[in-house]
Image (spheres, helix red, strand yellow):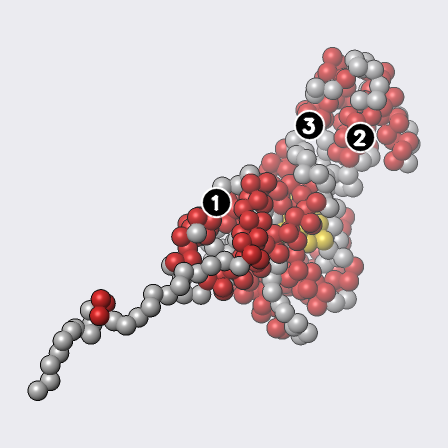
């Protein structure tokens, strides 16, 4: 006769030792601490920080920070490795962004229009490929500053175009992959790198800001089209008007396809006195702000655009505590001499 003394399905009767709780290594703790520190420095909520920089949702990131997450997953080490990759990518992003100014905010209407357009394009589904934003401005128009502002406010990944793109599609692919933090391993072929880049961008909506976009050829334009068609990525191109017109003429077929996927084109045509006054307000010329803004805007539209406006505002700080229009004219002349521009007349 068989006697059953206990129910083997009863957990109390199982001869099992509870699994030891997962303990983070020192390196893993440092990774989480570094990410938390970056979030505090960037002053972003969990939702914004995860949207812009992490591969996890806000609820998961919250549980990671509290430690609750490690009791809910089967492979904590895999999650920690992903966090480590996110940290390396974030550090690369911030290193690139630091090269695009000091994070200062240019109070420009055109910049605000670009930021609004980015939000609109970001809200589109992957079925709508019209997620390209083109910003055209002359030298000094703030294209690089805009890229830095997009990185700071919208988590954009900055790609600086270079001449090598004209002759090498591989160089263009590699620059895009490096900028967004895609793990392409030791891929030596264009096809495998392209596959890894698109797979990475398909995971979440990414904003890519392309600065100095003078060097687009047929193949690199096709890469933009491929990214817009197959991923939810938003792309912002910052270029000089003549450069944009040049590669549109040279690659008319590919450029036409790109124009069809353009959400908006914003052309900075001139510096308005109201914009110049935002740079001058609070400075030595506040007593003659309206007239000074007209003078500075006129000089800026002759050469240097907002770079000239900013430099004049800084030059005024080296003069009298209360500047008059003559002081403004002298500051303009000093800046123009420094920049190597000699106008026939200064607009009054």
Tell me which corner region of the image, top left, top right, bottom left or bottom right, holds residue 41. top right
- Neighbour class for label 1 at 10 Å: few (<14), some, many (≥20)? some
Does any portion of residue 281 appear in the rendered image? yes
Tell me which corner region of the image, top left, top right, bottom left or bottom right, holds residue 6. bottom left
Residue drawn at (69%, 49%), measured in percent from left and top?
Answer: 95
Q: Nearest the camera: 99 or 125? A: 99
On residue 215, the disc is: none
Tally of marks = 3
Screen quadrant of the N terminus: bottom left
Q: Position of residue 346 (x, y in %)?
A: 86, 24
Give above or below for 331 relative to 165.
above
Residue identified by numbered label 3? 275
Does any portion of residue 225 appear in the rendered image? no
Cβ atoms under marks 1 and 3 closer than 8 Å: no
Task: Give the mark nearer the N terminus: 2 vs 1.
Answer: 1
Q: Position of residue 290 (x, y in %)?
A: 72, 17
Residue identified by numbered label 2? 311
Residue at mark 3 to residue at mark 2: CA–CA distance: 14 Å
Residue at mark 1 to residue at mark 3: CA–CA distance: 34 Å
Q: Position of residue 171 (x, y in %)?
A: 72, 65
Screen quadrant of the C terminus: top right
Residue identified by numbered label 1? 46
Task: Give the mark nearer the N terminus: 1 vs 3.
Answer: 1
Cβ atoms under marks 3 and 2 closer than 8 Å: no
Q: Secondary structure at mark 1?
A: helix
| Mark 1 or mark 3, whichever is nearer to me | 1
Q: Nearest the camera: 281 or 180? A: 180
- Neighbour class for label 2 at 10 Å: few (<14), some, many (≥20)? some
- Neighbour class for label 3 at 10 Å: few (<14), some, many (≥20)? some
| Mark 2 or mark 1, whichever is nearer to me | 1
Residue drawn at (87%, 35%), measured in percent from left and top?
Answer: 339
* Side (left or right) of 132 relative to 302: left
């Amino acid at each position: 006769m068989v006697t059953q003394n206990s129910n083997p399905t009863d957990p109390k009767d199982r001869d099992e030792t509870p699994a030891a709780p997962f303990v983070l290594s020192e390196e893993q703790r440092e990774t989480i601490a570094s990410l938390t520190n970056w979030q505090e420095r960037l002053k972003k909520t969990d939702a914004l920080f995860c949207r812009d920089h992490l591969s996890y949702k806000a609820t998961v990131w919250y549980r990671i920070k509290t430690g609750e997450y490690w009791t809910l997953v089967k492979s904590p080490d895999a999650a920690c490795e992903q966090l480590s990759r996110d940290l390396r990518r974030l550090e690369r992003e911030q290193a690139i962004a630091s090269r695009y100014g000091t994070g200062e905010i240019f109070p420009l209407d055109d910049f605000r229009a670009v930021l609004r357009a980015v939000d609109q394009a970001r809200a589109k589904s992957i079925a709508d490929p019209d997620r390209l934003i083109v910003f055209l401005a002359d030298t000094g128009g703030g294209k690089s500053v805009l890229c830095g502002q997009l990185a700071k406010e919208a988590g954009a990944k900055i790609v600086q175009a270079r001449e090598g793109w004209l002759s090498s599609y591989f160089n263009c692919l590699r620059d895009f992959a490096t900028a967004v933090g895609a793990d392409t391993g030791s891929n030596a072929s264009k096809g495998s790198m392209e596959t890894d880049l698109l797979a990475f961008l398909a995971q979440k909506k990414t904003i890519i800001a392309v600065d100095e976009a003078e060097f687009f050829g047929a193949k690199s334009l096709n890469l933009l089209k491929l990214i817009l068609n197959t991923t939810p990525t938003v792309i912002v191109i910052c270029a000089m008007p003549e450069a944009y017109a040049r590669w549109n003429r040279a690659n008319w077929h590919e450029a036409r396809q790109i124009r069809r996927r353009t959400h908006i084109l914003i052309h900075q045509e001139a510096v308005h006195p109201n914009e110049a006054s935002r740079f001058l307000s609070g400075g030595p010329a506040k007593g003659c702000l309206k007239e000074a803004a007209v003078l500075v805007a006129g000089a800026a539209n002759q050469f240097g655009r907002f770079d000239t406006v900013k430099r004049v505002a800084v030059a005024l700080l080296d003069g009298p505590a209360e500047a008059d229009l003559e002081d403004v004219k002298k500051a303009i002349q000093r800046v123009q001499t420094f920049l190597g521009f000699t106008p026939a007349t200064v607009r009054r």
